[in-house]
Image: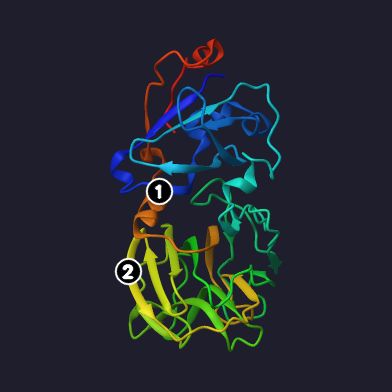
């Protein structure tokens, strides 16, 4: 099959981003005409001459991720399906693990698998189903709409600290959507994420969604500190949430790609050993809604990084603009595969 080429829309990338994984809706590049095995044999490049190859992960026929060494407002992505090469091993130079080499854990939430190769598989309690249409790709983790303060609540938990402790900088991000039939009572909370000790006394980070005094807000720990109005409501809309811990005390929070609050808390303990999505590990304040594309990494993300990442994931069809591959190419085979160009 011919290669598919697209160019980044200039307005979606405010500055050069290095080592950033980008999402591609493979359904927009004709992957639906392929088998999954054929899509996994594809090669991803940053130029139309098919010279500079990218690491990539093919999750499904609607979801792929590629790692860009230097993403700018004019960068290209060329996906070459020639049908004759085998899939990369996950640990290979251009395989799955290389895409996520800067991350501690990445969960696409079609299952409990950690895509980084670090082995932080989640424990699925009370059968969280991976079904329906997620924000990215074809699957999502649906925690259901049951009472968040009962032992029957569904939760995804890693019983390890993911190599992240209270004395390091780190980033957590995910896409969230609450069930539209849920109404919180005053002071009731739903947990978005937690990284804490078994006792709950020492918290590296913890974020809960709360209805209080007629307004929605979210809380950050330590100190159970109100951290601003929480802007999303129940329904069919997905929201991207990110918290960046950029020192032992300083936190930044992003919602929908925009920085909404910065705060300084007391120094967190280094003893955290539980990490949970939609739970703090116990049976209190469990999330009632959907989760997709949860990521944890060491280091920090800039505001420009978050803007780029949000634009890429939120409106993938406009992030990549169709372009003509043009030119001849280094080899006749490369030139011959330039017969069709489609929007990603």
Report the residue at 39% width, 56% height from top: 306
In 3D space, how far apart are the residues under numbered discs 1 and 2 (Cα atoms)?
A: 21 Å
Towards the viewer: 205 or 280: 205
Q: Residue 141 appears at what percent x and percent y?
A: 59, 59
Towards the viewer: 307 or 301: 301
Quadrant hosting residue 157: bottom right
Q: Residue 28 appears at what percent x and percent y?
A: 47, 33
Q: Which residue is mark 2?
A: 260
Towards the viewer: 64 or 249: 249
Q: Is residue 72 above or below residue 196?
A: above
Q: Secondary structure at mark 2?
A: strand
Q: Is residue 205 above or below residue 337?
A: below
Report the residue at 28% width, 43% height from top: 11
Q: Is residue 236 left or right of residue 103?
A: left
Q: Is residue 271 left or right of residue 29?
A: right
Residue 206 seen: yes
Q: Residue 111 appears at what percent x and percent y?
A: 66, 55
Report the residue at 41% width, 57% height from top: 237
Q: Residue 312 appears at what percent x and percent y?
A: 41, 46
User: In the rendering, which numbered label is found on residue 17?
Assistant: 1
User: In the rendering, which numbered label is found on residue 117?
Assistant: none
Q: Is residue 335 above or below residue 130?
A: above
* Of the image marks 1 and 2, the number of the one nearer the N terminus: 1
Crowd rating for badge 2 (residues with CA inside 10 Å; few <14, some 14–19, many 20+):
some
Report the residue at 37% width, 77% height from top: 217
Residue 216 seen: no
Crowd rating for badge 1 (residues with CA inside 10 Å; few <14, some 14–19, many 20+):
some
Q: Secondary structure at mark 1?
A: strand
| Mark 1 in CB contact with mark 2 (< 8 angstroms) | no
Of the two numbered discs 1 and 2 in the rendering, the one whose residue sits closer to the viewer: 1
């Amino acid at each position: 099959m011919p290669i598919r080429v697209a160019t980044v829309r200039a307005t979606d990338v405010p500055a050069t981003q290095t080592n950033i994984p980008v999402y591609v809706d493979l359904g927009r590049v004709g992957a639906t005409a392929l088998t999954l095995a054929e899509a996994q044999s594809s090669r991803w490049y940053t130029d139309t001459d098919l010279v500079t190859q990218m690491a990539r992960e093919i999750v499904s026929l609607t979801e792929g991720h590629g790692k860009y060494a230097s993403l700018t407002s004019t960068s290209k992505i060329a996906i070459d399906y020639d049908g004759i090469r085998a899939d990369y091993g996950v640990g290979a130079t251009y395989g799955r693990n290389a895409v996520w080499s800067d991350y501690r854990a990445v969960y696409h939430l079609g299952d409990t698998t950690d895509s980084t190769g670090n082995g932080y598989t989640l424990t699925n309690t009370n059968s969280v189903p991976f079904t329906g249409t997620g924000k990215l790709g074809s699957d999502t983790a649906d925690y259901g709409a049951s009472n968040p303060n009962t032992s029957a609540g569904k939760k995804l938990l890693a019983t390890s600290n993911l190599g992240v402790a209270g004395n390091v900088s780190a980033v957590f991000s995910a896409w969230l959507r609450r069930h539209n039939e849920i109404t919180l009572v005053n002071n009731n909370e739903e947990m978005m994420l937690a990284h804490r000790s078994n006792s709950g006394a020492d918290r590296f980070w913890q974020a809960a969604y709360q209805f209080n005094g007629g307004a929605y807000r979210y809380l950050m720990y330590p100190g159970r500190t109100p951290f601003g109005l929480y802007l999303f409501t129940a329904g069919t809309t997905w929201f991207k949430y990110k918290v960046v811990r950029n020192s032992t005390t300083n936190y930044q929070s992003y919602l929908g790609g925009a920085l909404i609050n910065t705060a300084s808390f007391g120094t967190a303990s280094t003893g955290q050993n539980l990490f949970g999505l939609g739970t703090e590990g116990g049976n209190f304040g469990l999330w009632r809604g959907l989760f997709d594309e949860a990521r944890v990494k060491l280091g920090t993300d800039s505001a420009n990084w978050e803007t780029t990442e949000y634009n890429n994931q939120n409106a993938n069809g406009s992030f990549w603009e169709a372009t003509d591959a043009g030119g001849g190419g280094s080899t006749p085979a490369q030139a011959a595969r330039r017969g069709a160009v489609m929007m990603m």
